[in-house]
Image (cartoon, grey):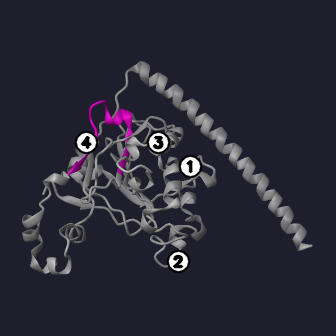
Amino acid sequence: TTLRWCCTQFVAGEHAMLYQRNVVAAFLRCEPEKLSVQSDEYHYATLPFSPEKTFDAATNWSRWGHPSKRKHPRYDYHMQGASDARPPAIFFLHNGLPADAPEFRSIAVCSVHLAFGEGGKSETRDRQLMNLGSLMPGPGYDGTKCLYALVGDFNSDKSVAKVGQDLASSDFGDRVMAAVNEASPGHVLGLRPGVKTSIGGFRYDEVIVHSDSLGKKRRAHVYPKREDIPTGEDLRKALGDVRLQEYKLLQRAFETVFTDHLMVFVDLAFHTLTPEQKAERDREREEKLAQAASKREVNLARLAVVVEKLKGIVMREGR
């Protein structure tokens, strides 16, 4: 009973988190009854980004308004060519203390499902990958108090031009991570180059975490390994004759009955700082926050100019 699994509510019909309350509470240094678990669709209103630079705008979801007000059928699957793209979800677990308390500890996970597109080709996905910055914690991220991870089905191998490469070993991946780190410095891809995350030998999934949380030796891994999954007669016995009558190919049968994805996991740890490092970190964070605030003020000023011009156009047309 102490290791009973719990599940959050489903978000956007796609995302959910399984967790063990006692284990998470112990990790965050609190009693199980004090553990706070929250889940919701990711919102963008308070982020220091101009509207056109958000993941939401890159997917063209803004046309449909806030998710709670959307009336378009199956909006999470087909919108303006964003085939199979789902709205991202955020999961936030913390130990119940005020955020400014020295003992505050938390875990934040953003789960995504990027566009796939007809035959795997999608300009929407390419835009999404280049605008992941608005899904990141930003320049004020404190790895001593929060472990943040951006995870999910990126369909990333379909955006890499050269066969055999992946996001971690391609020029496109370098540009993606450069954009991520411009918005939220210090983040890396958790999976090494060449690691496949599907039963079919593709690289669908990615994990983006801060390098300080990952450490020098830890990496993300896939479980089980593709070579450990039963094939041939073993898989035939596991699926049964009924399933094999429906699906002739064993791999296709496995994908349909179970999943075409393998599990990806990563071991993270809260970053620890010396007093000198903490002072330097705080100074750099204040500078980055000031820069972000200044950039946001500039964007708001530009937006105000556009609004005034639009008001003038409306008034002239009204005459």
Which is in the foreground here, disc 1 or disc 3?
3
For the question of whether residue 31 can be seen, the reply is no
Q: Secondary structure at mark 2?
A: loop
Question: Who is closer to the viewer here, 93 or 238?
Answer: 238
Residue 171's tag is 3
Q: Secondary structure at mark 4?
A: helix
Q: For the residue marked with disc 4, what is the amino acid?
A: Phe
Earlier in the chain: of badge 1 and badge 3, it is 1
Examine the rendered structure and indicate whether residue 5 appears above or below residue 287: below
Earlier in the chain: of badge 4 and badge 2, it is 4
Earlier in the chain: of badge 1 and badge 2, it is 1
Q: Residue at x 50, y 37 (%)?
A: 140
Residue 72's tag is 2
Q: Which residue is mark 1?
A: 47
Q: Residue furthest right?
A: 319
Q: Residue at x 36, y 63 (%)?
A: 15
Q: For the residue marked with disc 3, what is the amino acid?
A: Asp
Earlier in the chain: of badge 4 and badge 1, it is 4
- Residue bounds of the magenta highlight: 206-224
